[in-house]
Amino acid sequence: MKICFFVLSLEKGGTEIYLLRFLRYFLKNNKAEVTVFCKGNLGGSLLTEFEELGINIVLAKVSYFNIFWKVFFNLLQH
């Protein structure tokens, strides 16, 4: 199973901390290839913790909707 989540960055914030907690629990009980797509091209203070879980991190500066879909579909092909 492949799963992709989209966030602006991996700085400590409500969404990012919730996602990290969710993925810690989820990956204990499920096998999945998880990708977190940071559309602001920003890593952040939580980057190492996501990587330690074996989560693929994609940093990309996306400012237009059409470019977003091109990058997204390229990711799905890999």
Image: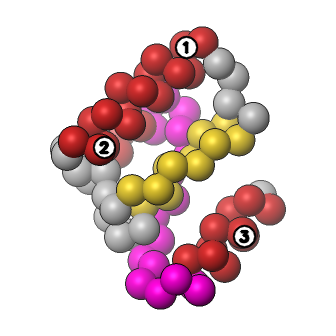
Q: Quadrant of the N terminus?
A: top right
Residue 70 on the magenta span? no
Q: CA distance from mark 2 to mark 1?
A: 19 Å
Q: Is 68 placed left or right of 11 in the picture?
A: right
Q: Which residues are magenta?
A: 51-67
Query: x%, y% of residue 20?
Result: 37, 33
**Are circles 2 and 1 on residues that touch, CB within 8 Å?**
no
Residue 39 in the image: above or below residue 17: below
The quadrant holding residue 76 is bottom right
Residue 73 visible, this angle? yes
Residue 15 in the image: above or below residue 65: above
| Disc 3 element | helix
| Disc 2 element | helix
Amino acid type, residue under disc 3 in the picture: Asn
> What residue do we see at 35% from left, 70% from top?
40
Q: Looking at the image, is mark 3 or mark 2 earlier in the sequence?
A: 2
Q: CA distance from mark 3 to mark 2?
A: 24 Å
Residue of label 3 = 74
